[in-house]
Amino acid sequence: MIKIQYENLTIRQAEAADAKQLAAWWNDGAVMAHAGFPKGLGTTREEVIEGLGNGLMVIEENARLIGECNYRDLSDGAAEIGIKICETDCQNRGVGRKVLSMLIGWLFSNSYSKILLDTNLTNTRAQHVYESLGFRRVKTNIDSWKDQLGRLQSSVEYKLVEADFKSYI
């Protein structure tokens, strides 16, 4: 079971008790808009429980759920990650940078040599955080997918190797 701690922050494996909060975030269009779901996902607590495991983790600050993150093994020492700080009062305070430092450090210490992620081209705040951690822009995909409202969206792909990693913890 994964549990990574630093100061008042914890990343741990998501469990059934977290499903109600995860479903609430995933169904909130304001939380999910950057991921292309301005209407939310329309998922149930039960569906969240069915999908537990598979690298899904929750983020706690002072034992309060504030977001989620995940990783997926891509083989050849590569992992793909994602993160959402879902509680607005926890955004723009450096929490995401610390959580990413925790997760990335853990992945590098567990045999991964390359971390990949992508984000919406309009999410410049996230891009700034990723680049400050040492991620390098690999590719920009212009008008490559449509969101729930049928609007074309673009994304940016990033890659990080351990030698370039700048931890904030």
Image (cartoon, rainbow, N blue to C red):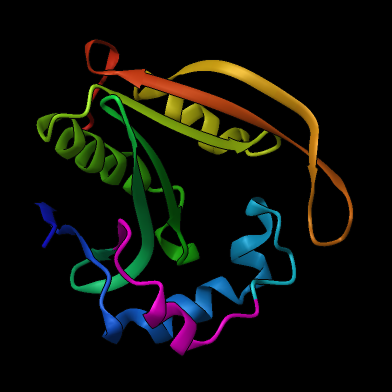
> Which residue occupies the foreground of this view, 53 or 11?
53
Q: Is residue 24 left or right of residue 94?
A: right
Residue located at (72% from left, 26% from top): 141
Residue located at (63% from left, 39% from top): 123
Expressed as whole percent of the image width and height from the top left, the position of residue 136 reads: 46, 15
In this view, 8 is above or below 151:
below
Expressed as whole percent of the image width and height from the top left, the position of residue 105 reads: 17, 33
> Which residue occupies the foreground of this view, 102 or 160?
160
> Can residue 103 be found in the magenta stretch?
no
* Residue extending furthest toward the top: 163
In this view, 140 is above or below 107:
above
Q: Is residue 86 left or right of residue 62?
A: right
Q: In the picture, residue 152 is in which quadrant?
A: top right
Expressed as whole percent of the image width and height from the top left, the position of residue 48 reads: 44, 78
Residue located at (34% from left, 24% from top): 133
* Residue extending furthest toward the front: 75
In this view, 31 is above or below 63:
above
- Magenta-drawn segment: 42-57
Image quadrant where one finds the C terminus: top left
> Can residue 45 be found in the magenta stretch?
yes
